[in-house]
Image: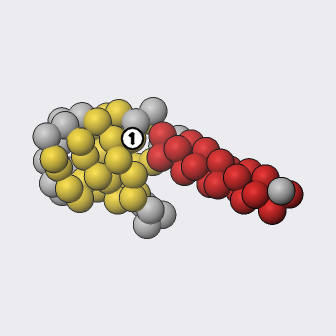
Amino acid sequence: MSKKMISLAMALAFVASSAVASFAADCAGTVKVVAGTAVTVTCADGTETKAEGAAKVGDKVMVKGGKIEAAKKKKAVEGC
């Protein structure tokens, strides 16, 4: 009986951690795959995350809360 309970607890822990990890990924990276509004982004640290939004393959984007935001461009420095 205790082996079944331990196995069940481990399975539930795995499912819960997988669900949280897929939604909690906030990163900056490049769009790898686009399927409708579902986008796969390769983050700077090498991980991949899925998000919702409009983007093209190769775009640099920010992923926050599972949604795509355009990456901020640096302003040019003006001088004399």
- Residue 8 higher or lower than 77, as above or below: below
- Up the image or down, 80 lies above or below 31; here it is above
How is the protein colored in the picture? secondary structure
* Quarter of the N terminus within the rendering: bottom right
Residue 70: which quarter of the image? top left
The three-letter amino acid code for the residue at tag 1 is Val
- Which residue is at 81% across, 62% downward? 3
* Quadrant containing the C terminus in the rendered view: top left
Q: Residue at x 39, y 41 (%)?
A: 63
Which is nearer the eye, 22 or 27?
A: 22
Q: Residue furthest right?
A: 2
Residue 41 in view (yes/no): yes
- Estimate the x, y position of residue 18 in percent, counting from the top left: 54, 51
Q: Residue 50 location in percent, x, y?
A: 35, 47
Res. 77 in view = no
Q: Residue furthest front?
A: 1
Q: Residue at x 86, y 57 (%)?
A: 2
Tell me the residue at 58%/49% (across/down).
15
Spot the residue most to the bottom.
Answer: 46
Look at mark 1 in the image and give the residue it sits on.
Answer: 63
Left/right placement of residue 14 relative to residue 58 reads right
The number of discs equals 1
* Quadrant of res 44: bottom left
Could you classify mark 1 by the number of other residues whose Cα lies within 10 Å: few (under 14), some (14-19), or many (20 or more)? many
Name the side, left or right, on which 67 lies relative to 33: right
Image position, residue 26 (x, y; %): 48, 43
